[in-house]
Image (spheres, rainbow, N blue to C red):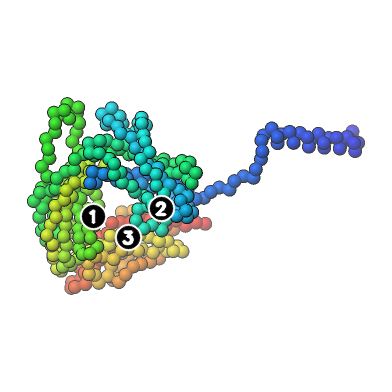
Amino acid sequence: MVQSPKGLAGLRMALLAWLILAVAACGSKTLPRPIDEQAKPEIATITAQVKNAQVLLNWTLAAPLPGDQKAGTHAFAVNRAVIDPQTDCPECPPAAAERVAELEAAAAASGTQPELKTFSWTDKTSKTGATYRYQVVLLDSKQRPLGRSEPVQATLLSPPAAPRKLKTTVEAKGILLQWQPPKRPKQSKQSKAKGEQPAALRFVVERSNGPAGWAVVSTEPIQGNSFLDSAVADGGNYAYRVISLLDQQGVYVWGESAESRVVVAAKQMKPPPPQTVWVIPDQGKLQIHWTLSEGATTGYHVYRKQDGEISRLTLTPIAAPPFVDDNAAANTVYSYAVSAVAPQEPHEEGLLSKWVEFRNLAFQ
């Protein structure tokens, strides 16, 4: 059966009316939004520590903040709640939290950063003996929350006394520090009755070798009563201080310190290894970079590890980074480490640096 022109026109009008009604029923339509490839600036980590009877918060973002932060496009709010650790838990939501600070992102940034990603804030109104729970909130320019940190808890315990009888010994491998722990007050009967466990005692070692000031040389808080500093230069002058800490489940209360006299490192020592090693891919090859050793050197050796097998890639010491590994296979995992070589005869090789792992990806 053949439709007449009038019948076809009517059919078209009916289809057009049906489409208009369908669009109206589904609401307004817009073009799909493009996927934002940049990660949202969510708060990834937060830590707390107690120094000088004040709580210091440090937090990092999963991605740097976008835009010009001098214009105040982002800010942070710090919420604090006073809790009883015996009847509460770190995972529980605070019953009565108050906003104790609000600061622009640029003002809270730690140190000099090309991209704003790490931040800090000190609670100067905290009181000794109290337990606080903190949470940091990221705000946009209209004070709308963009993300929250996990809650972090800190108790302002009385700081520990300084370590006792600190002594230093110059050895062939470095400078050995030894000390005795400070005497601690006896636990009260009330605390024992509640089943409270005293905070563990830890120590941090700092070193000074000139106008740069003090720098931490112990990568992790020390549980024992000794530390060997092997990253010293041949015949270098150093002073040390050992600081007592109380460890309350990863939140450290910094205490008093004991300071040593200036110590002269042994001569004819093997140079210390580089502190940091990193890998940069370069058109199928791998560039191995490292920081220079603090001691005098005649060069460096580069090592590669694959499936537990270690091989040295340099026949003779190279003067400075980088070293190019042009025999790295595609889609293979390698680990690299670097050692320093002493300038004097017999040119002894020092210890290896920490291994850094890298997957040499190849894209089709």
Tell which of 234 and 45 is nearer to you: 45
Q: Position of residue 139 (x, y in %)?
A: 45, 44
Q: CA distance from mark 2 to mark 3?
A: 30 Å
Residue 106 numbered mark, or none: 2
Q: Is residue 257 left or right of residue 25?
A: left
Circle 3 or circle 1, nearest the eye: 1
Q: Is residue 53 visible?
A: yes
Q: Is residue 51 left or right of residue 76?
A: left
Q: Of marks 1 and 2, which one's residue comes earlier in the chain?
A: 2
Residue under the point 20% across and 63% down: 209
Label 2: state its secondary structure.
helix
Quarter of the image that includes the N terminus = top right
Tell which of 273 and 154 is nearer to you: 154
In this rendering, the answer to whether 194 lies above or below 176 is above
Q: CA distance from mark 1 to mark 2?
A: 26 Å
Residue beneath label 3, please?
277
Q: Is residue 334 visible?
A: no
Tell which of 317 and 78 is nearer to you: 78
Residue under the point 24% across and 62% down: 212
The three-letter amino acid code for the residue at tag 2 is Ala
